[in-house]
């Protein structure tokens, strides 16, 4: 930060450190860390829009802030001056999609995006991302762990999707088709001449 206070990498490093440390803090410290890292993650994106890790961190932050519980929101408003602006689930998914676009071989981005899709009820998108993740070879031990998590997440989603497809097929079978209009029944009578 001392060498490049406005640099994308340095702001990303600070934001990542704050995000990682936030889980170690008590609730108030964690919320304070989430508030403080906002400016760093946005500066990282502004100065290095080609950095997929920054987009991933932005998506994680947006999702976490969007899902503050009632007590976290109340504490943020009363003690910290308000909930940090920018927390939104749709924006979080868009940020992770951008990260995946920049780094399609990043298993952690695929896993994060699939989880968000799943939590937001977008099961088919989650399945598509997880299937793509299956084709990515793990390069590190961390990749291997994330790859296993992706493989564990996929079967329940596939079962749930199959159940939904069965329910839809059953509903279609039970629906009575509406009568099709005949050519004569679609004509409207002209009141001036009394003929259809």
Image (cartoon, rainbow, N blue to C red):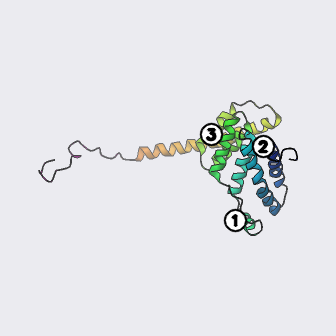
- The residue pinned by badge 2 equals 8
Find numbered disc 2 in the image and state the secondary structure of the residue it sits on. Answer: helix
The answer for how far apart the CA atoms under marks 2 and 1 are is 33 Å
Between 50 and 88, the one lying in front of the other is 50
Towards the viewer: 86 or 21: 86
Q: Secondary structure at mark 3?
A: helix
Residue 21 point in image, percent of width and height: 84, 52
Tally of numbered tags: 3
Q: Of the residues tagged 2 and 1, which is closer to the observer?
A: 2
Residue at mark 3: 127
On the rendered structure, is 94 left or right of 167?
Answer: right
Identify the residue at image location x=74%, y=39%.
51
**Residue that appears at 56% across and 41% down:** 162
Q: Depth check: 72 or 155 in front?
A: 72
Q: Which residue is mark 1?
A: 70
Give the main secondary structure of the magenta stretch: loop
- Is 157 placed above or below 74 here? above
Q: Tell me the magenta residue range.
A: 177-196
| Neighbours of disc 1 within 10 Å: few (<14), some (14-19), many (20+) | few
Taking the image as drawn, is residue 119 in sight? no
One can see residue 84 in this view: yes
| Residue depth check, mark 3 versus mark 2: number of the one nearer the observer | 2
Front: mark 1 or 3: 1
Residue 141 location, quadrant: top right
Point 80% across, 57% down: residue: 33
């Amino acid at each position: 930060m001392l060498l490049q206070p406005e640099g994308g990498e340095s702001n990303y490093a600070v934001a990542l450190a704050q995000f990682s440390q936030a889980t170690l803090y008590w609730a108030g410290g964690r919320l304070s860390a989430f508030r403080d890292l906002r400016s760093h993650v946005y500066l990282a994106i502004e100065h290095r829009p080609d950095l997929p890790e920054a987009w991933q961190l932005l998506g994680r932050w947006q999702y976490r802030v969007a899902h503050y519980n009632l007590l976290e929101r109340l504490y943020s408003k009363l003690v910290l001056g308000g909930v940090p602006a920018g927390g939104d689930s749709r924006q979080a998914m868009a940020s992770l999609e951008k990260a995946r676009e920049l780094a399609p071989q990043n298993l952690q981005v695929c896993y994060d995006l699939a989880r968000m899709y799943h939590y937001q009820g977008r099961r088919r998108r989650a399945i598509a991302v997880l299937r793509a993740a299956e084709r990515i070879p793990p390069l590190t031990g961390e990749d291997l762990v994330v790859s296993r998590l992706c493989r564990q997440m996929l079967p329940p989603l596939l079962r749930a999707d199959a159940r939904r497809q069965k329910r839809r097929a059953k509903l279609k079978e039970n629906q009575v088709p509406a009568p099709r209009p005949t050519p004569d029944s679609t004509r409207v009578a002209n009141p001036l001449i009394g003929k259809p």
